[in-house]
Image: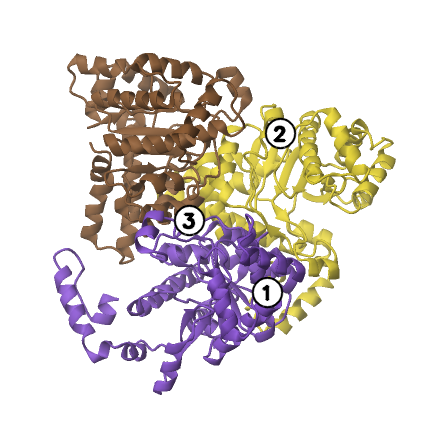
Chain colours: A brown, B purple, C yellow
Amino acid sequence: MFAAVFGIKFRLDPETADAYFDIINAALAEPAFLPRALFERFGIEVLATTGGALDPLDHHRAIRASGWPGQVVPTFRPDDVVDPDREDFVTNLQRLGELTGENTSHWSGYLAALATRRAFFRTYGATATDHSHPTARTVDLSKTEAQALLDRILCGRAEAGDAELFRAHVLTQMALMACDDGMVMQLHPGSWRNYNPWLFRRFGGDMGADIPTRTDYVSGLKPLLDRVGMRAGFTLILFTLDESTYARELAPLTGHYPCLRLGPAWWFNDSPEGMLRFRRQTIETAGFYNTVGFNDDTRAFLSIPARHDLARRIDCAYLAELVVTSQLEEDEAVDLAFDLAYNLAKRVYRL
Amino acid sequence: MFAAVFGIKFRLDPETADAYFDIINAALAEPAFLPRALFERFGIEVLATTGGALDPLDHHRAIRASGWPGQVVPTFRPDDVVDPDREDFVTNLQRLGELTGENTSHWSGYLAALATRRAFFRTYGATATDHSHPTARTVDLSKTEAQALLDRILCGRAEAGDAELFRAHVLTQMALMACDDGMVMQLHPGSWRNYNPWLFRRFGGDMGADIPTRTDYVSGLKPLLDRVGMRAGFTLILFTLDESTYARELAPLTGHYPCLRLGPAWWFNDSPEGMLRFRRQTIETAGFYNTVGFNDDTRAFLSIPARHDLARRIDCAYLAELVVTSQLEEDEAVDLAFDLAYNLAKRVYRL
Amino acid sequence: MFAAVFGIKFRLDPETADAYFDIINAALAEPAFLPRALFERFGIEVLATTGGALDPLDHHRAIRASGWPGQVVPTFRPDDVVDPDREDFVTNLQRLGELTGENTSHWSGYLAALATRRAFFRTYGATATDHSHPTARTVDLSKTEAQALLDRILCGRAEAGDAELFRAHVLTQMALMACDDGMVMQLHPGSWRNYNPWLFRRFGGDMGADIPTRTDYVSGLKPLLDRVGMRAGFTLILFTLDESTYARELAPLTGHYPCLRLGPAWWFNDSPEGMLRFRRQTIETAGFYNTVGFNDDTRAFLSIPARHDLARRIDCAYLAELVVTSQLEEDEAVDLAFDLAYNLAKRVYRL
């Protein structure tokens, strides 16, 4: 990143840290380092943000109004109105009702409100939803059960397990909506958010103390897959922080269900060894074309080229191994390299 | 397979698919591609089928009657009369009683019937049994408890967990019988069979939607091992679809118990990377001579040479690494290569 | 070991076994092979033993009295007075009370006695404690709850789970004491001790039939980390027999908490492949400087040089890979090699 973006040719260490600081600081003041200039310099074709269900997408509106041609689209990530463990959940549901004119204390109104917000996101170019859940659990409740569950949560009479049950059921409902409106669904499960209470008390949520947990996809996803796993046009992209599921659960599930795709090595696993383990443990069972290429969930805009560059190098190293061991021929590897780097992401995310 | 068996020298792709079809079709019509001709051409010394406890082994009888010298032996796989979750379980127990002249609604009659069928399989050359269970759980019940459990199941009063308990207890009984009759026991646990209900409703069972699950060997096998783990002459070969158990559970257990052996990388893991992970994660703790060589549970007869060829290449690649890193000397690696490819399977399976 | 320590240049095999025996036997009779001579020949700077809380450390006193300058220090491993599942637990608590003049049937007296023994170990140079628990579970009970728990255990009225609860709570207390007295804490969880009852009945405990089990660090350690995870000066070194936790749990936890360090690949994983997996699955997330170098828990004194030599070779092979793939520069790798081989252990263990 320092070399490619800032042109720094010497190593970062205690002696050179000040020089790094000065060079970066000077560069950031130049017009060439403004976000839109970098967007163009990086050759970004599409950049997707994520926003909560209540997000007014003001910045997306501003970009459109500005006339700038860069394609920046939102992703619908409704955790704010799906996770009853959030302190602001009840308030969020009220706001969701106000935004959409639906009665979100009725199960049908709640679902209609979600569908409305999905449509709103699509008007700004969204093609995907994203769901960050503690587990991969899904259930498929009746409408009566769902209403009773919602009632308990809204009245403060939620029992142990109700929050998990609610998230699990909404995930199945999101999958059903995806079958209707064609949005690609992404599931990022298995992170214990705000694990460190000291950090949470001092700095609030989402400050980095998120720790992976063991994740069960096979029994977790079954109710959802039983409901929509064979629907044409439905796509569910699975991510994991639990590598023990790569070969045991994710690759076999993805190899079987036409709707499933494997997201790239995620978060802590988004590293040279981690990316290589992802390929080695999934491809033989799931196949290259059930993966989605590399997507980068960085918050650091400047890191985008370096991260894509790394992912491409690791993928090419893996392909080269297959060529050297006569498992692929060279022209096949070249085609695959292009697909993994570019075409698959475009196709799967319907860009 | 295409190259070695059919002599095709060009790559399979959309352009050549028709040519492949024509060549294969033409070959299959020739006498040289009849099963017995291929058996001889492949140099197969023994081929083992698997049959349910009720299987009359008619085909085995026919082979023997034909005078053909190829050795095709059955394997006793009594899941049909061991798994109460099967719809035909009660009927199967009745048929088992009729076949053997035992009262299979009595626990002692049920066990005697199983022993009789094991003996019947041995008359056709069987040396092994095979057990496909959802988990590796075993228990060691008293006869009174076992009879009560059997009663509940046969009377349709089975409680939650009873089917699992029954399978778990019969597994221990099968181990005891193996101590008596010398048959080698194989356990293939951890597959969630018929996971996809759509497929099951449309095409019935065993159509491919089997998904691996997390498997616990350490607490699961303890009752069985407590009972027969130190018996001389007893052999239990363990397989897994959960690679996280290789280094943590299977290698330490196998390194400790004289009766245990590790089956080769199985099913989804029966691939270049999967086979290499098997060796890397088990051999240092379990040792080469606690593995059983490669055995191929393919349903595709024509794939046998290719699969054995692949397994041998991977094993030799692993051995070569050990030589290059001075962990083995070359002559030791050569001896091991022969043992892994041929001698171990013959010795462990008592062929 | 045979080459470096005994100078044997030919391979160990059935033909040479007698020659090996003779050479070793002759060598062991020579003064150069006495323990203190080997200690000096091996260049050992510090050797740490482990002793139970009741250990009078007589041998340590004898070494000091002898005037020999070799540094041999004890490690405080209080499992004898922490694990209520031990048959001698109640007796041990009485002896602990006698040794320290505390009433160990009172929770406060029990804690004071533990603190006293920690101090006693420190007078012989101990800088660390070690805790071998079946799981990584911790809890943080009130004093009233702790006293009630201790009462139930001492009166023989312990309920299911009480022994685990007691160990879990004492672990948190040990962490609090470590914050006070500066001893480095080590946790070795996840071994099912004396798994084989046949062996236990015949030869007693600790004879080798210990089998690893799945270990949960993330929920297990949370109560302890909630209590002391951010305390300056506290160090907790985590070991594992469950490699599936390397990338998923241990590396992220260690990367986050300043107090946590990763112990080296342990026991069954203390092998070329095992050590390499440890580095590959932890370093990218945890960083080299959150590991503690190699420490060798061998009971075989003569194996020490060979084991450290192996660990160093594996670490250097890993570093070399990083250099070859341009992830490290050579001078950085050289510095790291020295730190991993020597400096880190000295620094983390406060030697």
Q: Amino acid at mark 1?
A: Gln
Rendering coords of residue A252 (x, y %): 36, 49
Viewer can see residue B346: yes
- Measured as percent of width and height from the top left, residue C273 is found at 48, 52
Q: Amino acid at mark 3?
A: Arg
Query: What residue is at 52 percent from the left and 37 percent from the top?
Result: C250
- Numbered disc in front, either 2 or 3: 3
Q: Which residue, given by chain and number where applicable, does mark 2 sit on?
A: C224
Q: CA distance from mark 1 to mark 3?
A: 29 Å
Residue A51 image offset from top left, x and y in percent: 32, 21
Q: Which mark is residue C341?
A: none
* Pointer 1 and pointer 3 on the same chain: no
Q: Chain of mark 3?
A: A
Helix, strand or loop at mark 3: helix
Q: Pointer 1 indicates a residue of which chain? A: B
Residue pointed to by mark 3 = A248
Q: In the rendered image, which residue does mark 1 sit on?
A: B173
Crowdedness near tag 2: few (<14), some (14–19) or many (≥20) residues, C-alpha within 10 Å: many
Image quadrant containing the N terminus of chain A: top left
Identify the residue at image location x=56%, y=60%. Answer: B254
